Amino acid sequence: MAAASAGPGSAEHPERAALHRLEGAVDDLLERLAKLRRRLEECTSARAEAEELVRRFTGDEEEAARLLSRIRTLHEENAELRHRLGQGRATVERLLARLRFLEDQR
Protein backbone atom coordinates (compact mmCIF):
# COMPACT_ATOMS: atom_id res chain seq x y z
CA MET A 1 0.00 0.00 0.00
CA ALA A 2 1.45 3.35 -1.02
CA ALA A 3 1.55 6.15 1.53
CA ALA A 4 -0.32 9.34 0.67
CA SER A 5 1.95 12.17 -0.30
CA ALA A 6 1.80 15.49 1.52
CA GLY A 7 1.73 17.46 -1.72
CA PRO A 8 -0.92 20.02 -2.56
CA GLY A 9 -2.95 17.51 -4.58
CA SER A 10 -3.10 14.93 -1.81
CA ALA A 11 -6.11 13.98 0.26
CA GLU A 12 -4.40 15.33 3.40
CA HIS A 13 -5.31 18.97 2.68
CA PRO A 14 -9.10 18.39 2.52
CA GLU A 15 -8.88 16.18 5.60
CA ARG A 16 -7.01 18.90 7.48
CA ALA A 17 -9.60 21.48 6.43
CA ALA A 18 -12.39 19.13 7.50
CA LEU A 19 -10.69 18.59 10.85
CA HIS A 20 -10.45 22.36 11.40
CA ARG A 21 -14.14 22.74 10.57
CA LEU A 22 -14.98 19.92 12.96
CA GLU A 23 -12.88 21.47 15.72
CA GLY A 24 -14.61 24.79 15.12
CA ALA A 25 -18.02 23.14 15.29
CA VAL A 26 -17.12 21.36 18.54
CA ASP A 27 -15.84 24.62 20.04
CA ASP A 28 -19.07 26.36 19.02
CA LEU A 29 -21.14 23.58 20.57
CA LEU A 30 -19.19 23.71 23.82
CA GLU A 31 -19.70 27.47 23.97
CA ARG A 32 -23.43 27.03 23.29
CA LEU A 33 -23.65 24.39 26.00
CA ALA A 34 -22.00 26.71 28.53
CA LYS A 35 -24.39 29.52 27.59
CA LEU A 36 -27.38 27.19 27.87
CA ARG A 37 -26.27 26.03 31.31
CA ARG A 38 -25.94 29.64 32.50
CA ARG A 39 -29.33 30.46 31.03
CA LEU A 40 -30.89 27.42 32.70
CA GLU A 41 -29.59 28.57 36.07
CA GLU A 42 -30.98 32.07 35.46
CA CYS A 43 -34.34 30.69 34.33
CA THR A 44 -34.60 28.37 37.31
CA SER A 45 -33.99 31.25 39.65
CA ALA A 46 -36.41 33.52 37.80
CA ARG A 47 -39.07 30.80 37.84
CA ALA A 48 -38.82 30.40 41.60
CA GLU A 49 -39.12 34.18 42.01
CA ALA A 50 -42.11 34.31 39.65
CA GLU A 51 -43.89 31.51 41.47
CA GLU A 52 -43.44 33.33 44.76
CA LEU A 53 -44.73 36.58 43.25
CA VAL A 54 -47.81 34.83 41.82
CA ARG A 55 -48.57 33.34 45.22
CA ARG A 56 -48.23 36.73 46.90
CA PHE A 57 -50.21 38.53 44.20
CA THR A 58 -53.17 36.18 44.14
CA GLY A 59 -53.31 35.49 47.84
CA ASP A 60 -55.16 32.32 46.86
CA GLU A 61 -53.25 29.07 46.59
CA GLU A 62 -55.75 27.53 44.15
CA GLU A 63 -55.64 30.54 41.82
CA ALA A 64 -51.85 30.62 42.09
CA ALA A 65 -51.68 26.91 41.24
CA ARG A 66 -53.95 27.44 38.21
CA LEU A 67 -51.87 30.36 36.93
CA LEU A 68 -48.60 28.52 37.51
CA SER A 69 -49.98 25.46 35.70
CA ARG A 70 -50.91 27.63 32.72
CA ILE A 71 -47.47 29.22 32.74
CA ARG A 72 -45.84 25.77 32.77
CA THR A 73 -48.02 24.68 29.85
CA LEU A 74 -47.00 27.77 27.88
CA HIS A 75 -43.34 27.14 28.68
CA GLU A 76 -43.67 23.54 27.48
CA GLU A 77 -45.31 24.68 24.26
CA ASN A 78 -42.57 27.25 23.81
CA ALA A 79 -39.90 24.60 24.37
CA GLU A 80 -41.54 22.37 21.76
CA LEU A 81 -41.59 25.22 19.25
CA ARG A 82 -37.94 25.98 19.97
CA HIS A 83 -37.12 22.33 19.48
CA ARG A 84 -38.87 22.35 16.11
CA LEU A 85 -36.99 25.50 15.13
CA GLY A 86 -33.75 23.81 16.12
CA GLN A 87 -34.60 20.80 13.98
CA GLY A 88 -35.44 23.11 11.07
CA ARG A 89 -32.13 24.92 11.48
CA ALA A 90 -30.27 21.62 11.57
CA THR A 91 -31.99 20.55 8.36
CA VAL A 92 -31.10 23.83 6.69
CA GLU A 93 -27.48 23.51 7.87
CA ARG A 94 -27.29 19.98 6.42
CA LEU A 95 -28.69 21.23 3.12
CA LEU A 96 -26.18 24.07 3.08
CA ALA A 97 -23.37 21.62 3.80
CA ARG A 98 -24.51 19.47 0.88
CA LEU A 99 -24.64 22.51 -1.39
CA ARG A 100 -21.16 23.55 -0.32
CA PHE A 101 -19.92 20.03 -0.97
CA LEU A 102 -21.49 19.99 -4.41
CA GLU A 103 -20.03 23.41 -5.17
CA ASP A 104 -16.59 22.20 -4.10
CA GLN A 105 -16.91 19.23 -6.44
CA ARG A 106 -17.36 21.51 -9.46
Image: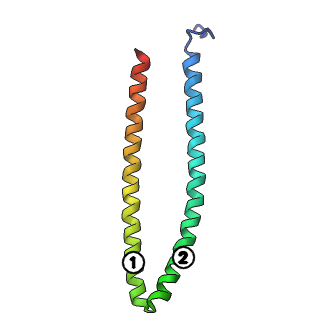
Q: Residue at x 41, y 49 (%)?
A: 86
Q: Is residue 31 above or below residue 12?
A: below
Which residue carries the number 1 mark? 69
Quarter of the image where the C terminus is located: top left
Q: Amino acid at mark 1?
A: Ser
Position of 94 with respect to 7 (left or right) is left
Callout count: 2
Q: Is residue 91 above or below residue 14?
A: below
Q: Amino acid at mark 2?
A: Ala
Position of 39 with respect to 90 (left or right) is right
Quarter of the image where the N terminus is located: top right
Q: Residue at x 41, y 84 (%)?
A: 65
Tell which residue pokes out farthest to the bottom in this image: 59
Separation of marks 1 and 2 at Cα, in angstroms? 14 Å
Q: Is residue 71 above or below residue 106?
A: below
Q: Residue at x 44, y 89 (%)?
A: 58
Which residue carries the number 2 mark? 48
